[in-house]
Structures are given as C-alpha cells and as structure tokens.
Image (spheres, rainbow, N blue to C red):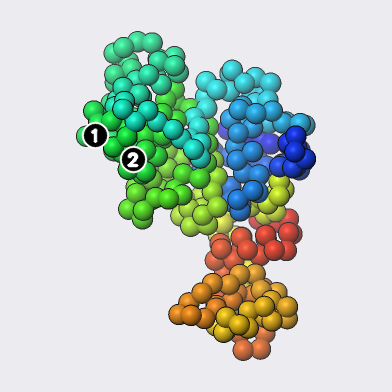
Amino acid sequence: MELKITDLSKTYSNGVQALKNLSLTIPTGMFGLLGPNGAGKSTLMRTIATLQEADSGSITLDGLDVLNEKHEVRKILGYLPQEFGVYPKVSAESLLDHFAVLKGVANKKERKELLEALLQQTNLWAVRKKNLGTFSGGMKQRFGIAQALLGNPKLIIVDEPTAGLDPAERNRFHNLLSEIGENIIVILSTHIVEDVTDLCARMAIINKGEVLVQGEPLKLMQSLSGKIWKKMIEKSELQNYKTMHNVISSRMYAGKSIVHMLSDTQPNSFEAVEASLEDVYFSSINTRETTTV
C-alpha cells in the first residue's frame, strides 16, 4: 500500500502559494515530513485528510482518488491535527465512545471492546474516567491517537504531535507511534528533527511548498559524509564566517557560537564532524537542492 501525491499545488486567496507542484510517494510505515514553520506541511496534511481542496494535482491511496472520493477516504483515515481540542468536562472514555459512534461503530458491545483495547494501547485505561481537562499535554496527545485509530485506518496523519511535550511524554508518544506504524502508513509532520531521526525509515524535507530532499534518513546522512565541518567561534565573528563560508547552522554553547559548514574540502581551522539529520535539514533548506536517496 502506498500514498502517491503528484504535482499538488495550492495557492490561498491572499496570494501565498503553499504547495508548488509537490510530488511524493509514501509507503507503508513511518514517514517523516520535515520542514520549518510555514513550509507547507499543514496545508499538505489537511489536503490529504480531505479537509481542504487543492488547486491542481492528484492524490491516490490504495486505489482511491483522495481528492474526489473523500467519503471513502475518511473511512480508512485517522487524523491528529496540530491543534486538537477536547471537551474538558467530559471523560476520556465518554468522548472516545462518542467518536466511535460517529465513526460508525454502532454495536454497543463491539464499541466497548474497541474502547478498552484503544485505551489500553495508549496507556490511558487507568484514567479513562477522568475528565480530559485534567490531562497533561502528552495524555491529550495519546487520547488523540486513540481517536485516530478508530475504525482500523490504513493511513494516520499526525501533525506536530510532540511540540511542547516533556521528554518522558515524548518518549511514550514515540513508542506508541512506532508500534502503530508497523503495518499502516503513518505520516509524521514535524519541525523537530529528532522525531524523524528516532522514528522514520523514510522522510522528506519540504520548504516553501516544494520537496527539497527525500529518502532514507541514514542514507541522506551518509551522503554528507566527509562534508560537514565545525568550529567554535566568538559570537561577534558569526556574521563574518557566514560571509566567508557556507555556514549551514550555528548554535550557542558556553557563550560562544558553534558553526557547522558544508564543504567538499576541509576549511582552515575547522574540524570534521559526523553528519547528522540536522545537518541534512539545514543544508537542504539553505542550498535548496532537490535530492533523492
């Protein structure tokens, strides 16, 4: 099973072109969609989720025309949007039961068994009677995954799911997504590089509505082997280094700046560093070279 996106374009009424002839093929498993804020990730996710129209292009999922067979697609789709609202004074069990009814699970006994399985899977069974308003951010996200799993979906979309989670909740959520993504398509849309590094066998980097890089994270990192160099400099020197070298990223450390640069040969006074997915990300965003590995 695969999701095939071909020449998808979308321009909003204010003139912003969110997607520019974007094409991707997404196989079964965890797929990371990485990009900065405003890259077009949420527009793409909402379009796949049948929540908005595209101007042109096509999307197919297991033989279904996503853009024209929305009702059929929704039967096999689970979606956790970036902003997932809950009714604060309703229990997790009650709201999930309501969602199950909306999803078409009419049989009460079947629904009860399904709810127990999902609440156990998302580690929320012990708090099923508690109101959602008392849940932490991570618990709400796990509840969001529980509702997304209703109806045995073939495709699940999660949009910025770990933003704002503490490290423990982030790890729990990663483990849950990893388990879910073994047999279906799970698209993880995020600007957090570590989420893709930890979870995804394949990925794409998009910016300004275009695919810049796609492939396997490990191979993409290997493609930069021997080309990433770093140096610690004074903060006041940063702009000068950016002018003189192909600096792809910088970060503060102990009051100084650590810069990473991309070069086929070792620059003077720089030391070699093993390429990370963050280096792939910043180099693709800065150079805008489309690559497939």
Q: Does residue 105 appear left or right of residue 204 in this picture?
A: left
| Amino acid identity at mark 2 | Met
Residue 60: image location, x then y, percent: 66, 29
Q: Secondary structure at mark 1?
A: helix
Q: Nearer the viewer, residue 63 or 12?
A: 12
How many other residues sit within 10 Å of disc 2, few (<14), some (14-19) or many (≥20)?
A: many
Q: Tags 1 and 2 in contact by the CB under 8 Å rule?
A: yes
Q: Residue at x 31, y 22 (%)?
A: 94
Which residue appears at 32% of the width and 15% of the height? Answer: 110
Residue drawn at x 71%, y 46% is 209
Q: How many residues crowd around disc 1 within 10 Å: few (fewer than 14), some, or many (20 or more)?
A: some
* Left or right side of 17 for 116: left
Q: On the image, numbered disc 2 is attached to which residue?
A: 139
Q: Quadrant of the C terminus?
A: bottom right
- Report helix, strand or loop for mark 2: helix
Q: Residue extending furthest top? A: 107
- From what the image shows, is residue 137 above or below residue 240? above
Q: Residue furthest bottom?
A: 269
The residue type indicated by label 1 comes to Val
Q: Which residue is mark 1?
A: 127
Distance between the Cα atoms at labels 1 and 2?
A: 10 Å
Q: Which mark is residue 196?
A: none
Let me know if residue 60 appears in the view: no
Return the residue nearer the eye: 104 or 160: 160
Question: Can you give x and y, in whole percent of width and height, for residue 18 in the image?
Answer: 71, 42
Q: Quadrant of residue 261?
A: bottom right
